[in-house]
């Protein structure tokens, strides 16, 4: 039987000068550690409950469809995982 890893969820937010924010949807593999950004959501006022619920559903859909390690490899810190994610997506989420 293959190993079934455990993960702890971390939402990390970044304020952008435009008045928007980015929510980085990160997970930490436990017990041995390592972080990966699964996705990032850009949010802006006015905040719509439906949009926020959609972001939440997407988090779980992605998590169940693809092992988080396959999304970009594990990094020793959240900051390194976010930096690598931003590089992979050409800084689209802001810096």
Image (spheres, helix red, strand yellow):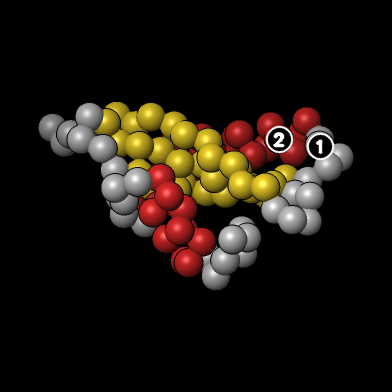
State the residue in front, 78 or 92.
78
Residue found 27% across the figure and 31% down from its top: 30
Give the structural element (helix, strand or loop) at label 2: helix
Q: Where is 2 relative to 95, above or below?
A: above
Where residue 94 sits, quadrant-wise, is bottom right
> What distance separates the C-alpha of mark 2 from that of mark 1?
8 Å
Residue found 30% across the figure and 36% down from its top: 29
Count of picture labels = 2
Where residue 26 sits, quadrant-wise, is top left
Residue found 57% across the figure and 49% down from its top: 40
Q: Earlier in the sequence, mark 2 or mark 1?
A: 1
Q: Where is 46 relative to 18, above or below?
A: above
- Residue that badge 1 annotates: 47
- Residue farthest front in this picture: 17
Residue 84, disc: none
Measured as percent of width and height from the top left, residue 1 is found at 13, 32
State the residue in front, 62 or 17.
17
Measured as percent of width and height from the top left, residue 65 is found at 43, 43
- Residue farthest left in this picture: 1
Q: Where is 35 relative to 52, above or below?
A: below
- Residue that badge 2 annotates: 52
Which quadrant is home to the C terminus?
Answer: bottom right
- Residue farthest right in this picture: 46
């Amino acid at each position: 039987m293959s190993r079934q890893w455990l993960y702890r969820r971390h939402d990390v937010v970044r304020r952008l000068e435009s008045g928007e924010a980015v929510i980085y949807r990160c997970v930490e593999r436990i017990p041995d550690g390592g972080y990966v950004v699964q996705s990032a959501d850009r949010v802006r006022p006015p905040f719509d409950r439906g949009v926020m619920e959609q972001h939440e559903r997407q988090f779980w859909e992605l998590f169940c469809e693809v092992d988080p390690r396959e999304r970009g490899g594990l990094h020793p810190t959240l900051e390194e995982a976010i930096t690598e994610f931003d590089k992979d997506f050409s800084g689209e989420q802001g810096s």
